[in-house]
Amino acid sequence: MSGHSAVVPRRWGWPVRDGGRVANVESATRYTATTSQVCGLYPFAVSSGAVVQGVPVGRHLHTSEPVGLDPAEWLRTGLVSNTGVWVQGQPGIGKSSITKRLVVGLVGFGMTAVIPGDVKGEYSALVEALGGSVWRIGRGAHTLNPLDAGPLAAAQHSASESERDRIEETIRARRLSLLEALTTIVRRGEISVTERRLLGAALDVVVGVRGKSQPLIPDVLHILTAPTTDLVRITAADDPRGFLLAARDLINTLGLLCEGSLRGIFDRASTVRPEPDCPGLSLDLSALDEEDDDAIAAAMLCAWAWSAGVTDAAAAHGKRRNVVQVQDELWRALRVAPGLVERSDRITRLNRHRGVVSIQVTHSLDDLEALPTEADRAKARGMASRTGILVLGGMAEKELDGIRRITPLTDAEAALVTSWAAPPTWHSGHTHPGRGKYLIKSGERMGLPIGLTLTPTEQDLYDTDTAFRRAP
C-alpha cells in the first residue's frame, strides 16, 4: 500500500437530505434595499437621529434619511438656544441655494421673508416669485431715507399712550444710532462725545420743534448751520461763530452725505412703502454695487434699520409674523470703519422682539479678521459663536481652525468637509466636488451630512451665475 493518503475535498453544509452539502460555495447575488424594507432580515440598522420635521434640506449622506431644518421649531423643542443660522463655505458650493430653500420653506410655514440689503440682487426673483415686494435702491430708482421711521410711524399713531412713548423712543434711538454710523462711515473714524450730543440735539429740534415726522439728513444739517442756544451750549462756545468752528468737522461730514459722492442716495424722502401681510420684502442694492465701499456700507446699514422697523411695527400692531431674515455680504459693510459692528448691532437689535430667524452667509471667517479694530473682531467672533446652527460647506483645512473655535468637529467631520473643497487643479468641465453638500452642526452634537437636490424650478430660480451663461 502506498504511504500517501487520499485528499478528501472539504464539504460545505450538512450530510442530510436537502442539507445543502456542496464542495464549492458560489458568490452570492447582492441586493440593495432600504432599511425599512430589510429590517426584518437585518434589524441592526440605527438611524442618524436626523430631524425629519421642518424644511426638507436634503438627505443624510450615509443613511439617505430625509433631513428637515426649522430653527424656530428647534428652539421650541430645546435643540438650540437661539434661531441664528451661520452658512459658510467656498464659492460654488451652493450657499445661496440652501439659504433660499430655507427661505421658501419657512415662508410656507407662515413666516415673512425679509432681505435687508441684497447687494447682488440675487434674491429679487425669489421674493417676487413668493408674491413679495422688491425695492431697488439707487440713483434714479427707489430711495431710502435713513431717518425714515418706516412702518413704525403708523404703529405709533395707532398705539396706546404708554406704547406710543416707547415706540417714539425706539425711533429716536435708532435714528441717532444710524446717524452716528453714517458719520463714522464717511469720516472713516469715530465721532466724539460732543458730536454725538450735537446730533441728538439737532435731531430733537427737527422733530420736536420743527414738527417733521420724517426728517431728512439735510434738515439736521440745516439746524447745525443755524444753531439754537442749546446747541451752542453743548460746545461751550461763546457765540454762534464759535459753535461753527467747534462743529465744523461734523457739519462737513454731514455735508458729504448730502453733496459728495453719496448725493442723491440718502438725502431724500423714502419711496419704499411696505404692504401689510406681504410674504416677502427685499431691498435690492445691486444698482450700488459699482459704488465705493462707503455707499454700500451706508446703504446696508440703512436697509438693516428699515427692516428692523418692519418687524417691530408688525409686533406693535399685534400682527406679529415670525420673520426669516438673510444677511449676505455682512462684513462688507462692517469693515469700512471702526465701531460699525457695535452700531449695527444696536441698529438691528434695539427693542427687537423675538421671532426672527437670522441667516448670515459668508465665504470665510477671515472676513471677521478684516474688521478695523480688535474690539470689532472680538465682537464679530462673539456674534458667530452665539449662532445656534452652523451649515458648513466645503472648505480648506486652514478654515477649520476658526470653525473649531465656534463648534467642535470630530476628525471624521473635518475630513468630510475638506473632501468637499475644490481641488487645487486647473482641469475644467467638472462641477465643484462640494456642490449641494453640507454639514449641519449645532452644539456638541454629531453633525448631519446632507446632500441637497434642487427641483427644476429651483434650479432656474436659485441660479446665481446667469451673468455668465452663454446665449442660446
Image (cartoon, rainbow, N blue to C red):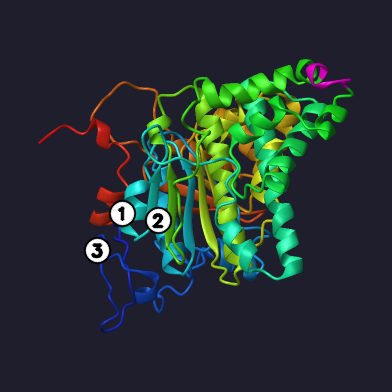
Query: Residue drawn 37% across and 54% down?
Result: 127
State the extent of the magenta-drawn residues as a range.
Answer: 237-242
Where in the figure is residue 109, as x and y percent of width and height?
A: 46, 69
| Most foreground residue, 467 or 441 | 467
Q: Neighbour class for label 1 at 10 Å: few (<14), some, many (≥20)?
A: some
Name the residue located 85 percent from the left edge and 20 percent from the top edge. 239
- The amino acid pointed to by label 2 is Arg
User: Any mark on residue 454, and which?
Assistant: 1
Closer to the observer: label 1 or label 2? 2
Residue 452 point in image, percent of width and height: 37, 53
Write the residue at 82% across / 29% down.
193
- Residue 249 lies left or right of residue 84; in this view the side is right
Disc 2 and disc 3: Cα gap in Å? 40 Å
Q: Secondary structure at mark 2?
A: helix
Type of amino acid under label 1: Leu
Image coordinates of residue 19 in percent, x first then y, are 30, 79
Can residue 68 be seen by looking at this rendering? Answer: yes
Label of residue 101 in the image:
2
Q: Specify the amino acid type for callout 3.
A: Thr
* Element marked by disc 3: loop
Position of the N terminus by quadrant: bottom left
Which residue is tagged 3? 29
Mark 1 and mark 2 in contact? Answer it, CB < 8 Å: yes
Point out the tag, 1 or 2, that comes first from the N-terminus: 2
